[in-house]
Each structure stands twice: as C-alpha cells, then as structure tokens.
C-alpha cells in the first residue's frame, strides 16, 4: 500500500485537477477539457491561504473545497470530473 502524499492536494484542488488532466493522456482530449471556475473553490490566493489555515487549525479540509472540470474524451464524449474530499469522481457523462 502506498503512502499518502506529504501535502494536501485539496489545498489547491484546481491546480491539482488541471495537472491531472494535462498529464493523463489516456483517453483525454486536453484541448477540449476545462475547469469550471464558477463551481470550484478556492480560486484566489487569499482563499487558498484561508483553506490552508483552516486545515492546519482543524486538521480537516472544508466541505466547500472542490475543483470541477468538463473533461473532453477522445471518443467525443464529455465527462464532468470533480476533485473533493472523496477524491476524483466522475459525476456525469454526455
């Protein structure tokens, strides 16, 4: 069993999800994939600092921390992918 990373990927979930989309070439069309910013948090530097501070203080990441993306697949479909406390989840396919 592998160890968890030494950092909290939810401290900056948008960057984590963007990186995952760019670096995973298996079936993903990165040119048609995009983060859904209105449904993602934290976005600003101040919000990221607030999330990090709350996480250090409470030992948990808030339920409002989420990154959401529309991921284009090579076969033409689109998947809504979410990164939150449950990890990466495919919410829908169209």
Image: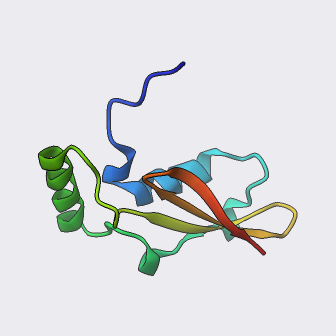
Image position, residue 33 (x, y; %)? 64, 67
Q: Nearer the viewer, residue 10 or 33?
A: 10
What residue do we see at 49% from left, 51% from top? 86
Side (left or right) of 77 relative to 52: right
Q: Nearer the viewer, residue 28 or 79?
A: 79
Image position, residue 57 (x, y; %)? 12, 47
What residue do we see at 29% from left, 52% from top? 61
Image position, residue 64 (x, y; %)? 34, 67
Image position, residue 8 (x, y; %)? 33, 42
- Asked which colour scheme the image uses, the reply is rainbow
What residue do we see at 35% from left, 62% from top? 65
Residue 35 vertical position relative to residue 11 in the rendered view, above or below: below
Residue 57 vertical position relative to residue 28 in the rendered view, above or below: above
Q: Quadrant of residue 84?
A: bottom left
| Residue furthest top as drawn | 1
| Residue furthest right as drawn | 75
Q: Quadrant of the N terminus?
A: top right
Q: Nearer the viewer, residue 49 or 30?
A: 49
| Residue furthest bottom as drawn | 38
What residue do we see at 42% from left, 71% from top? 40
Q: Quadrant of the C terminus?
A: bottom right
């Amino acid at each position: 069993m592998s160890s968890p990373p030494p950092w909290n990927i939810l401290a900056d979930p948008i960057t984590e999800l963007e990186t995952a989309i760019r670096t995973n070439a298996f079936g993903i069309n990165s040119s048609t994939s995009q983060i859904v910013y209105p449904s993602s948090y934290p976005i600003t530097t101040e919000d990221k600092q607030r999330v990090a501070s709350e996480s250090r203080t409470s030992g948990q990441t808030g339920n409002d921390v989420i990154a959401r993306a529309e991921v284009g697949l090579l076969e033409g479909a689109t998947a809504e992918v979410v990164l939150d406390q449950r990890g990466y989840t495919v919410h829908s396919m169209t």
